[in-house]
Image: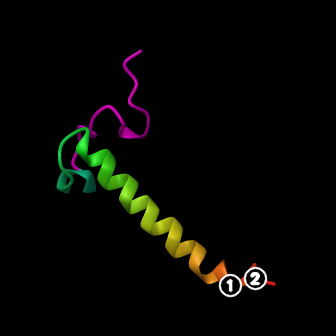
Amino acid sequence: MGTNYLYIVEKPESASLMDIFPEWPWYLLVLEGLLLVIVVGMYLPFAGLRRA
């Protein structure tokens, strides 16, 4: 089908922030690490609320 959802197959053809990342498949690991940092950062303010 030639689709590239979420740029998993290749980087976008136009200039983007992804140009500073390494080539496929290594940029997927960079994006996963970045996502992990963002999710943990968003969770930290609520981490102490669950303790009873």
User: Residue sitting at 47 percent across and 67 percent down?
Assistant: 38
In terms of secondary structure, where does tag 1 sit? helix
Residue 16 location (% of width, % of height) = 26, 52
Extent of the magenta region: 1-15
Q: Which mark is residue 51?
A: 2
Place of residue 31 in the rendered image (x, y in percent of width and height, measured from the top left): 35, 53
Is 10 a magenta residue?
A: yes
Q: Main secondary structure of the magenta part?
A: loop
Residue 19 appears left or right of 48: left
- Residue at 38% x, 62% y is 34
Q: Are marks 2 and 1 in contact (CB under 8 Å)?
A: yes
Extreme-front residue of the structure:
52
What residue is shown at x 65% (from left), y 79% (from top)?
Answer: 47
Q: Amino acid at mark 2?
A: Arg
Residue matched to label 1: 48
State whether residue 33 is above or below residue 22.
below
- Magenta span includes 9: yes
Res. 30 image quadrant: bottom left
